Image (cartoon, rainbow, N blue to C red):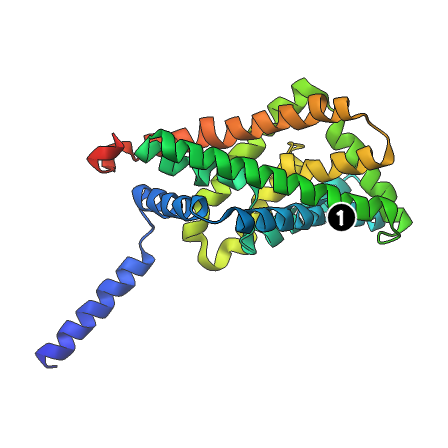
Amino acid sequence: MNKTTAIDEEQQEEASVQEATALAPKLIYEVIRREGEEEMARPNRSLVWSGIAAGVMISLSVLGEAVFRTYLPDTPSRFLIENLGYSLGFLAVIMGRMQLFTENTITTVLPVMVERSWGIFASMLRLWTIVMSANVVGAFAVAALFVFTPAIAPDVMVSVVELSHHATGMGAYASFWRAIPAGVIVALIVWMLPQAESAKFFLILTFTWLIAAGDFTHIVAGSVEMAVLLWMGDITAATAVGGFFLPVLAGNIIGGTAIFALMAWGQVRDELPANGD
């Protein structure tokens, strides 16, 4: 074996070790931080259309769960199985790289924690406002399709309405507290994605199933259910906003930002450059 061949083998071995080595927390932080900066630099129009698309496609969570509920036999295990349908919308949105508000409660917060300037804070609030508004527009649009057209089979629509009443009928207090774990779980998904590679599908499937199985509340998927009931006249706007939307929004933000993002920052802050202290 000549010297060149030995060097090549050593380089290949080193490359294999690096590929097999898990990313250090500060590298995961850096991946998500850069992604957040890229998102905040996107034009408003791009954010709007991406957010609307996410609001529409997240309806697959409601529809998927409703289909399972409609056609599965009524057994004690049906609840756990039907909640697999809840993952469908998240799979479409996250793997399709659409703008989902709850992802941004960690993605766009990490750059703010490093730079800590009013300018980047304002950019974060701009993105949050645009994406949340666009998600709601998409949710109301697809809910109108469900309610005012025969696009959904009548039996499935009955299940959609049942799920919607359950999701929005917990009351403001319970909705707020159940939204916090959902915010943490979505942030956890974002944190794990850089290392997931081929396991992304199962990562999203498993943890979004947990949101549904744990009966936690999610602001965007829940907005579809809220919009269905509003279009049908089953709840008032005051009940929808005060009893569901605002408490769940606050809980998701606290879970994704005040809890998970701060924990993520805390474990890497001493490893970041000096301007991040």
**Residue in the foreground of this view, choosing between 114 and 131:** 131
Percent position (x, y) of residue 155?
89, 47
Which residue sits at x=78%, y=39%?
Answer: 76
Residue 265 lies, with reference to residue 73, above or below; the image says: above
* Residue 111 in the image, given as x and y percentages of width and height: 36, 38
Quadrant of the image occupied by residue 6: bottom left
Residue situated in front as seen by the camera: 72 or 195: 195
- Screen quadrant of the N terminus: bottom left
Q: From the viewer's perspective, tell me whether residue 23 is left or right of residue 92.
A: left
The answer to whether residue 152 is left or right of residue 24 is right
Seen in the image, is 179 located left or right of residue 71?
A: left
Q: State the image coordinates of residue 92 (x, y, percent, origin top left).
A: 62, 54
Q: Amino acid at mark 1?
A: Leu
Q: Is residue 3 positioned above or below 59 on the image? A: below
Decide if residue 185 is in sight here: no
As drawn, the residue found furthest toward the bottom would be 1
Label 1 secondary element: helix
Residue at the left extreme, as displayed? 3
* Residue 138, quarter of the rendered image: top right
Q: Residue furthest top?
A: 173
Q: Is residue 125 left or right of residue 136?
A: left
**Residue 135 place in picture, x, y as percent:** 63, 42
- Which residue is rendered at x = 37% and y = 33% of the image? 119
* 155 or 54: nearer the viewer: 54
Residue under pointer 1: 63
Quarter of the picture holding the C terminus? top left
Q: For label 1, count other residues whose C-alpha is less than 10 Å away and answer few (under 14), some (14-19) or many (20+).
A: many
Residue sitting at 74 percent across and 49 percent down? 64
Is residue 127 among what the camera can see?
Answer: yes
Callout count? 1
Decide: is 190 above or below 277. Answer: below
